[in-house]
Structures are given as structure tokens and as C-alpha cells.
Amino acid sequence: MHIQELEVKQLHTVAEWLHGMNEQDKHYVAWLASDPNEIFEQIWTLTQFHEPLAFVAWEDEEIVGFIGILPFFEQKLCRLLGPYSLKKGTEVIEGLWDKASLTIQLHFDAVKVACFKANNDLVAFAGRHQFNLYNIEKTLALHHSRFSPSTKKEESIEEIQEHEHKELDELHPSGAYYTTNEMIDLSEKHTNKLWGYKSDGSLKGYLYFELVGTDEGEICFVNVHPSARDRGIGSALLEHALQYAFYVYKAEIVTISVRTNNEQAEKLYKNIGFAEINTIYAYEKEFGVDPSNTLLH
């Protein structure tokens, strides 16, 4: 086995391999795109930095492992795509981590990884390297066939405008996996939407939606100002997003995630028709780093 930095000429091969791996619960890692073309774009981005952010393990001409580092500069953290391994045992996983951790410890304060519980290799890896379990989230899904749209027209919901970005930032959780600016940038993509609920001249809540592939949508964030809760704002935002997903984008399924201790939100989602499909376990490891280190990009 040999491990080398991901090369541009390998992108198609590696993207297809990763797609096949992430389709299996026993290998699933969060934050990897679901469509092969989107995976290609995602890992291509990792080849555009001065520092190595992706490594492939090879055995002759066969891929046996991969690890990628998704950098989030404003938060000074990164997220792992992997480590993936086709071979049992720790050799491939530890070899990939040895390569990646050099970059990670040099440039980031913390590293995160998330997976299904069925991914025994990754759960064991997190334990060996003293990652802390910081979040458990259920993923719920709603199929188009189970959605009963409301006939009520909600005129308080519009796409968020630039002058509302400050209010949006105040509503957006500081520890979210996208910062406010990253979410705003991503919402510029034609398949993504950032809606706000506006009342009395101010932003009371928002919802961020992404189309994944051609037939799946994901509600990534939905938050309502504490002073405006229990007024049906969250429900209205969800209804708006679901109608858009199913009738404009023609999605077949929409997913949403909820922390296991957020019983009120989970009850709301299930009342709409969402059903639990899996649980994701998220781990984090913090480092002490020299703040003068920066990763050129």
C-alpha cells in the first residue's frame, strides 16, 4: 500500500469510488456530497490549495482508502471526509490520518468528523484519537407522496436581501457547520434558497434549503427569534420550503436533521410527516495551534 496526495488526473476515479463507499451505511461519512458530479467538484476544490488537503491510499492500481480535509477558515476548524478504508484493520485509516493530521494540527484549532453508528471503523478511529462525541442528530425524511400542502398563502416569507444580513447573523447559531457568510454565499447557487420570515419590519426567522442531486432536497437550517417562537413561524417556513422543493424543484424526498434532545422540533417535523431514517454521531478533537499560522487559499 502507498498513500499519495490526490491529483487532478485522479478526480473522476476517486469521485466514483467515494460515491460507492458513501452509499453504504458501514462506510458513510457526513459532509460528503451525494451526487458523483458534486463529489468531483468538492474534492477538486481540495486540490486547489498550497497545502495538501486530500490523500488517496492505493494498492497497486486499486483505491483502498481516502481522506479529505474540508477547511472552514473563519471558524478555524476543518471537517474530515473520511478516513475511508476498504480493508479491515487500522493500517489504511491510520496511514491516512498520519498524512492529514500534519496539515490539520498546523493550521486548525479543531477537527470534526461525523458518521452513522454502523461505520464501526470510523467510530473506533474517533475513540483511538480521543475525539469527543459532541452531537447526535437524527435525520428525518419526507417523501413527496406523504406531503399534504396547505392552501394558505404566506406573504411574510421572501428571499433574504443584502440589507438583512446583519439580522440574519444574529439569528444564525455561532456553532453551525456553515457560518452566516458561507450560508449566504452558498445561497447564490440557483438550486439553493435562503428565505426569511419578515414581520413588523424585521427578520423573525429564516430557513436555508439546498437541492441535493436532482431529486433530493435538504433543509439545512431553520431558526426563529426567541421572542417570535410559538407563533407558527417555523411551520410556515417549513411549509414554504417543502412546497418549493416538491412543486418547483420536483424533488422526491426532503431531509432535515434535529438534535436528539430537541424534542419540540422533532415533534413538529413528525407532525408535518417527516419520519426518522438514521442517526448521525458527530465527533470533535481540539488542538492548541499557533494563531500566526495561516493557510493560503
Image (cartoon, helix red, strand yellow):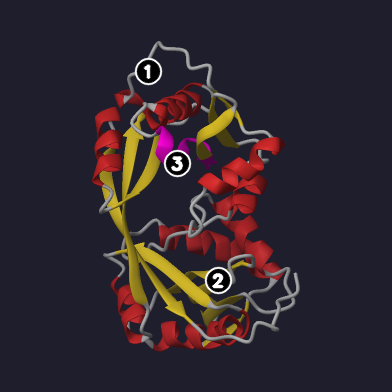
The crowd level at tag 1 (other Cα within 10 Å; few <14, some 14-19, many 20+) is: few
The answer to which of marks 1 and 2 sits earlier in the sequence is 2
Q: Earlier in the sequence, mark 3 or mark 1?
A: 1
Q: Sequence order check: which comes first, mark 2 or mark 3?
A: 2
Q: Which residues are magenta?
A: 210-228
Task: Give the amino acid type for the residue marked by disc 1 in the picture.
Answer: Pro
> Residue beneath label 2, please?
77
In what element is the residue under mark 1?
Answer: loop
Q: Main secondary structure of the magenta part?
A: strand
Residue 149 marker: 1
266 over 27 or under it: above or below = above
Amino acid at pointer 3: Asn
Within 10 Å of disc 2 (Cα), the crowding (few <14, some 14-19, many 20+) is many
Q: Residue 200 at x, y = what percent?
A: 55, 24
At horizontal 41% and vertical 12% (from top left) the residue drawn is 152
Q: Residue at x 70, y 68 (%)?
A: 9
Q: Is residue 93 left or right of residue 104?
A: left
Provide residue 284's location: percent of width, then percent of height.
41, 73
Residue 267 location, quadrant: top left
- Residue at horizontal 56 percent and vertical 85 percent from the top: 105
Q: Which mark is residue 223?
A: 3
Residue 38 vs residue 233: left or right? right
* Secondary element at tag 2: strand
Label 3: how many Cα within 10 Å (few below 14, some 14–19, many 20+): some
Which kind of residue does numbered mark 2 sit on?
Leu
Q: Nearer the viewer, residue 149 or 66?
A: 149
Labelled pair 3, 1 in contact (Cβ < 8 Å): no
Relative to 209, say whether 199 is above or below: above
Quarter in which the C terminus is drawn: bottom right
Q: 104 or 166: which is nearer to us?
A: 166
